Amino acid sequence: MREISSGQTFFLKKIFPVIWYGALGYIIARALAAESWKTEPLAVLAPTLMLLGGYLLMKRYVSTLADKVLDGGSFLLVRRGLVKQRIALEDIDDVHITRNDNPPRLTLKLRVPGKLGKEIVFIPKGLVLVPFFKHPLGAELAERVKRLRTN
């Protein structure tokens, strides 16, 4: 089985939030300790809004990502946290890849919801240098699913 999900997922889900919240928490703590918020309220308000905005963006775009996706030929093995799900390619209704996101996100819409829900979202392995072209992995998966549906 080949891994088709990116190694960036661990960084985005585990390391980046610690850096983000830690840095903003440090900035807020420094502003509160120096009492600069009394004369300059934006010293605390701006990083607090960034903290909230970061939380909402990470909840929407990062926490839903599958940790690992393996391609077994006629099926995909998906893991998110401790939950694993085997998905036959015939059970995939649609393959959608974002073109302008960095990193791109590949979404598999399932015919019947499984343990991980109706949609499986992951960052595909590989680099696309031209932003408006389809990711080759997304195109390959879409073609395989389409081929299985027509047979």
Image (tube, rainbow, N blue to C red):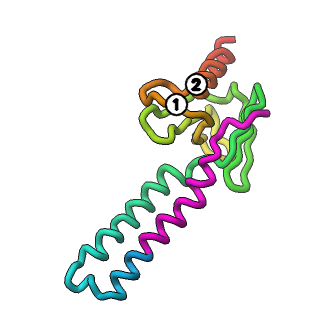
Q: Nearer the viewer, residue 111 or 64?
A: 64
Q: CA distance from mark 1 to mark 2?
A: 8 Å
Q: Main secondary structure of the magenta part?
A: helix
Q: Is residue 127 left or right of residue 48?
A: right
Q: Nearer the viewer, residue 81 or 46?
A: 46
Quadrant location of the C terminus in the rendered image: top right
Identify the residue at image location x=56%, y=50%: 64
Could you say which quadrant of the image residue 93 lies in?
top right
Q: Of the residues shown, which amino acid type is indicated by label 1?
A: Val
Q: Nearer the viewer, mark 1 or mark 2?
A: 1
Identify the residue at image location x=58%, y=41%: 123
Q: Residues within 10 Å of mark 2 (few under 14, many from 20)?
A: some
Q: Which residue is mark 2?
A: 136
Q: Residues within 10 Å of mark 1 (few under 14, many from 20)?
A: some
Q: Position of residue 138 (x, y in %)?
A: 58, 27
Res. 128 mark: 1
Q: Is residue 22 left or right of residue 68?
A: left
Q: Is residue 115 left or right of residue 100?
A: right
Residue 41 visible to the viewer: yes
Q: Which residues are magenta?
A: 1-25
Q: Is residue 24 magenta?
A: yes
Could you say which quadrant of the image residue 68 lies in?
top right
Q: Are marks 1 and 2 in contact (CB under 8 Å)?
A: yes
Please tell me which of labels 1 and 2 falls first in the chain. Answer: 1
Q: Position of residue 63 (x, y in %)?
A: 55, 54
Where is 148 relative to 92, above or below?
above
Where is 124 relative to 59, above or below?
above
